[in-house]
Structures are given as structure tokens and as C-alpha cells.
Image: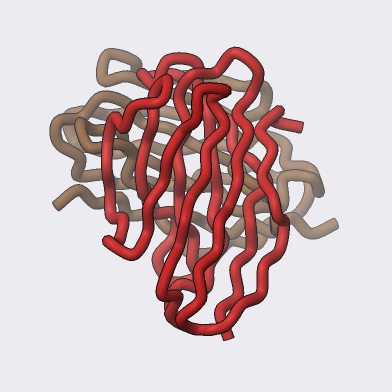
Chain colours: A brown, B red
Amino acid sequence: KNQVEQSPQSLIILEGKNCTLQCNYTVSPFSNLRWYKQDTGRGPVSLTIMTFSENTKSNGRYTATLDADTKQSSLHITASQLSDSASYICSGGGADGLTFGKGTHLIIQP
Amino acid sequence: DSGVTQTPKHLITATGQRVTLRCSPRSGDLSVYWYQQSLDQGLQFLIQYYNGEERAKGNILERFSAQQFPDLHSELNLSSLELGDSALYFCASSLTGGNEKLFFGSGTQLSVL
């Protein structure tokens, strides 16, 4: 069964600090790994998409990494801002569509 | 704004009833996806359509059905509703349905009382 596990469940950091969110996936056959940002009451917004041949992809202050051997991905947020407060969701793409993790709830405090 | 429109935003109904959720994809997108999001389960893939044809099916209950019309809008029909069907239902669209960006609507919050 395809699974995506994210950690931590929740995280509180001070504005301006960096943080890293983790994603472990078991998706077969694997085609892509995605990170989304979801604000409360809104739909997810795509941050990055990586295929198995890509190690890293950046989108502004967001940098995602992928290790296809260990089936792990991380999302690094640099110089956090109050607007980064949201849930961050990882998903693994396989033949039967996307399998989503439950997300990391990130709170940025001033 | 993602360009994906979902209606209604909120829906309150009773057990045993039937409801229809509507989705208009981004202009030019041929593929539509439906997802269910509950607090304890996260996002669950229900079904995907491409240019009017069903392309992939996920954890969609037999009480649920969907279709994509010639103008590419899609409807998700939920029948014999149960308390456990209460959730956020999202529609997403993409250009061809491959390894490309998905654009999500703002969702329909369904409450079954």
C-alpha cells in the first residue's frame, strides 16, 4: 500500500528563522514527489514537483530535496515570514495517482 | 486565484440525502481531479477525468459518482450521505493529467447532520 509520512506534525518557529520539514514515502511505481502549501480554508498550492532523477528544486525561499534511494524528501524554508504559516503537504505520485501525507502544520511567530 | 472554481462553498445536509458538487477547471485544462480532505485522513484521491473520460479511480465509494461534461466542467455526486462523509471536497485541474502542476479550487465544505 502506498504511504507518505510527514514529520513533524506541527512546528513553531520565530520569524526570520529557517526550518526543514521531512517526508518519507513508499509509492510504487514512483513517478514524482510534490510539496504543497495549504492555508487554512483554502486549496493546496503547488510549491515544487520533482521526478526521481531530480535531487533538488527551488521556488523562492522554498527548497525541496529528494533522495530516491532512501525514499526521503525534505522542504527547507529560508528566512521564514509570517505568511509562511500554513500546512505543508507532501505527496508521492504513482500509477494510481497521488498519495498525500497528513501535512506539517507550521506556525511562524513574530 | 488558481482559476479553478468550485460551487457551492458550503453545503449542509442531512443523512440519507444526495448532493452535487460542481467544478469548473482552469481555462485550457483538460484533466479534472476530485479529492476528499478530512482532519484525520488528509487528502484522499477520489477520481480523475481527462477530456470527458474517466482516467483513474482512487478510494471512491460506490455511493459517489462523478462525470466530466463536454464543456470540461465536472460534477461529483454524493448519495445516501452518512455522517462520515462530512469533509472538504477539492477539485483540481491540470493541462493533460501527467506529471504536471495541479491547480486546486477552494473546496466545498460538506457537513452532514
Q: Is residue B43 left or right of residue A11?
A: left
The image shows residue B69, relative to residue A26, as above or below, that is above
Q: Quadrant of the C terminus of chain A?
A: bottom right
The percent position of residue A1, horizontal first and vertical second, equals 14, 52
Q: Residue at the location (41% across, 46% down)?
A: B66
Q: Residue at the location (31% across, 32% down)?
A: B54
The image shows residue B73, relative to residue B30, as above or below, that is below
* Residue A54 visible in the displayed image: yes
Q: Residue at the location (63% across, 57% down)?
A: B108
Q: Is residue A2 left or right of residue B2?
A: left
The percent position of residue A100, horizontal first and vertical second, equals 38, 48
The image shows residue A63, relative to residue B110, as above or below, that is above
Q: Picture quarter containing residue A41?
A: bottom right
* Residue that extends furthest to the right in the rendered view of this protein: A110
Q: Picture quarter containing residue A18?
A: top right
- Nearer-the-camera pick, B46 or A85: B46
The image shows residue B20, relative to residue B39, as above or below, that is above
The percent position of residue A56, horizontal first and vertical second, equals 42, 20
Q: Is residue A7 left or right of residue A43?
A: left
Q: Residue at the location (58% across, 53% down)?
A: B21
The percent position of residue B10, horizontal first and vertical second, equals 71, 64
Q: Is residue A39 left or right of residue A70?
A: right
Report the number of discs: 0
